[in-house]
Image: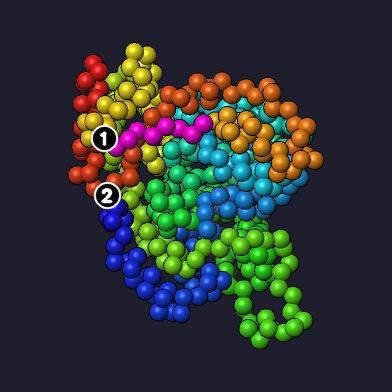
Amino acid sequence: MKNTWRFGEKEFQYIREVLDSGFGSGTSGGMNSRFEQAFAKKVGAPYAITFNSGTSTLHAALFAAGVGYGDEVILPALTVICNLSVTLAQNAIPVFADIDPDTFNIDPVDVERKITERTKAIMPVPLYGLPCDYDPLLELAEKHNLVIINDAAQAFMAEYKGRPIAEICPMTSYSLENSKHITTGDGGIIVATEEEYAVKMRKFGSLGYKNLQAKEGRIRISKDSFQKPSYKRHDQMGLNYRMPEVAAALGLAQTERMDFFMNIRYEAASMYDDVVNNCDYLVPQKVPEGYKSAYWCYTVKYIRGDVTWDQFRQKYIEFGGDGIYAAWALLYEETLFSSGDWRKVCPPLYNDLNYDNISCPNAEKVQPQLMQFVNNYGSREEIVPKVAALQKTIDFFA
């Protein structure tokens, strides 16, 4: 089995506890609650709610923010498709903002240019684990009465100007997919700084049960009253996005080992830095002073003209490196969007929208240049040959 280093006795212990307890659902107030409490404390937020993915967390956040039909949500052009998908799922209008060419994160200046009277939310994405420039975004949110939903899928334990990013924005979402810093296989968890948002998100992810609270995932507070024929269970719109108890058991154990996982990523990034700093055509993602990146992966711009991106990648693999990963296509260049198929989600709203003049020149230039190097290793011994392969590749093309 691959990645056996990721799972230890604690994971098996907590899974056995779930099975021994009768294998209840996520509404039992058991392992999910323990995971939520441990995670919230670890990242520095008062509230945490588990979900079945880092996409459903964002869907819940949009709902909690009051985003609905015809509202505009500003997204970075360079991000994963789920940011677009959940916006469309809420019958909201995606607005694409450009990125900073050095940090690869959403550009607050371009965000300001694209705010209109219909704008309801901004969804920054700390790409590859690097915090966004939050201060100007927060100023814009306050000025225009907007909500910031921080999609920190790749940014566990990241810090912005000395502060954990989980305490900066009203809602901060994390993915627990297999490649992330900690994992439940698939899954997500979102933290909130305000009780109102936490309650709305928890209810949205669990069918709108009225008993759910900011820190309470049980739906049956009193079994006797719950089973009366006259009892009304649901007081808010909600879907079934709950995390299974077995997945929460993994999440709890992984949270307890988070420092171990983070330190490996930091070490890998430092080792890549030592190699890349001597190569003028591999330009690493800029980490501004006062920022702490989570280094989900180590990312550079490849700006050499005489050796193609693919040629460099193939030689790296020949020398023993893991495959270099490319960045996603820009959201508005994905087939879903460019084909117009997304308009079928809500034809009355979307059919007449015009996206002919989308302009994100930095994102369009940077996206094809990006090279993502794997950081998901279990030890320094695993990292060394991959970094050595990069050095050999650079030397080969010298």
Examine the rendered structure and indicate whether residue 188 appears above or below residue 140.
below
Question: Between marks 1 and 2, how big is the CA–CA gap?
Answer: 16 Å
Pinpoint residue 34: horizontal percent, then vertical percent: 46, 68
Of the image marks 1 and 2, the number of the one nearer the N terminus: 1
Amino acid under label 1? Gly
Residue drawn at 57 percent across, 33 percent down? 334
Q: Mark 2 points at which residue?
A: 378
Left or right: 300 with respect to 48?
left
Q: Which of marks 1 and 2 is in front?
A: 1
Left or right: 276 with respect to 121?
left
Q: Mark 1 points at which residue?
A: 321
Mark 1, Cα crowd under 10 Å, few <14 / some 14-19 / many 20+, is many
The quadrant in which the N terminus is found is: bottom left
Residue drawn at 48 percent across, 46 percent down? 153
Callout 1 secondary element: loop
The quadrant in which the C terminus is found is: top left
Examine the rendered structure and indicate whether residue 1 appears above or below residue 21.
above
Stretch in magenta = 321-329
Left or right: 98 with respect to 324?
right
- Would residue 141 be seen by someone viewing this image from the given angle? no
Amino acid under label 2? Gly
Examine the rendered structure and indicate whether residue 192 appears above or below residue 249.
above
Pinpoint residue 168: horizontal percent, then vertical percent: 54, 45
Residue drawn at 54 percent across, 30 percent down? 330
